[in-house]
Amino acid sequence: MKKTTRKSGALGSIIMYPEKVKLSYLEGEPEKYRLHWKRATTIDDEDITAYAAQMTHVPESAVTLAQEALFEAIQLFCINGHAVQVPNLGTFSVHIDSKVVGTAEEADASSVKRCRLHFYPKAKLRAACCLENIRITVDDLLKLKKKSHTHI
């Protein structure tokens, strides 16, 4: 049985199904459920390139070159300590975590624990991906199909 929630004029659509969750290991606890997101697919770089080419009437080869140049720019500037703002998307920046040491002399390159790339989406992107723009369909049949595929 499918039940649709949220507004019908939504920009996107996501299918979800009820999934049993165990909140406690105590005997006699009532069953609880939450909605689990059935991820559609992963859109790869070729799909994005084809979409951008179609939407802008620019040849795919030119879109690919622009994407490669954008990647190179983000990589170059991030590894040199810059935060990189990509228009309409967000900001990329490298963060380096280090150990706390007792003296300034001990604070050297060996105290670095890890390096991570952070992405901070622009407010416009966050707003576009909010619940008001997504139609959610709850499909109880997916729950039943998922149960039949579980291994004992």
Image (cartoon, grey):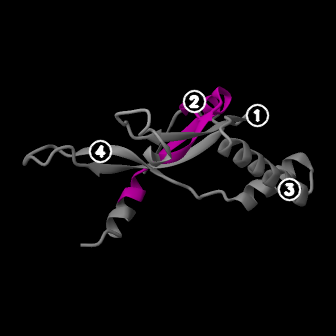
Magenta residues, as a range?
114-143
| Tag 1: amino acid | Pro
Instruction: Calculate the distance from the C-alpha at mark 3 to the C-alpha at mark 4.
Output: 47 Å
Instruction: Calculate the distance from the C-alpha at mark 4 to the C-alpha at mark 2.
Output: 23 Å
Q: Are marks 4 and 2 in contact (CB under 8 Å)?
A: no
Tag 1, which secondary structure?
loop
Instruction: Calculate the distance from the C-alpha at mark 2 to the C-alpha at mark 3.
Output: 35 Å
| Front position among marks 1 and 4 | 1
Q: Which quarter of the rendering shows the C terminus?
A: bottom left
How many numbered markers are drawn?
Answer: 4
Counting residues from the start of the chain, the first of labels 3 and 1 encountered is 3
Q: Are marks 2 and 3 in contact (CB under 8 Å)?
A: no
| Tag 3: amino acid | Leu
Q: Are marks 3 and 4 in contact (CB under 8 Å)?
A: no
Counting residues from the start of the chain, the first of labels 2 and 3 encountered is 3
* Residue farthest toward the bottom in the current orientation of the protein: 152
Q: Residue 91 appears at what percent x and percent y?
A: 66, 35
Q: Residue 89 appears at what percent x and percent y?
A: 70, 37
Q: Is residue 119 magenta?
A: yes
Instruction: Calculate the distance from the C-alpha at mark 1 to the C-alpha at mark 4.
Output: 40 Å
Q: Are marks 1 and 4 in contact (CB under 8 Å)?
A: no
Can you identify the residue that label 3 sits on? 65
Looking at the rendered structure, which numbered label has been put on residue 33?
Answer: 4
Residue drawn at the location 54% of the way across and 39% of the way down: 95
Can you identify the residue that label 2 sits on? 132
Residue drawn at the location 53% of the way across and 45% of the way down: 116
Q: Which image quarter: residue 46?
A: bottom right
Counting residues from the start of the chain, the first of labels 4 and 2 encountered is 4
Can you identify the residue that label 1 sits on? 87
* Classed neighbour count for the residue bearing mark 3: other residues with Cα under 10 Å, few (<14), some (14–19), many (≥20): few
Tag 2, which secondary structure?
helix
Q: Residue 42 appears at what percent x and percent y?
A: 60, 58
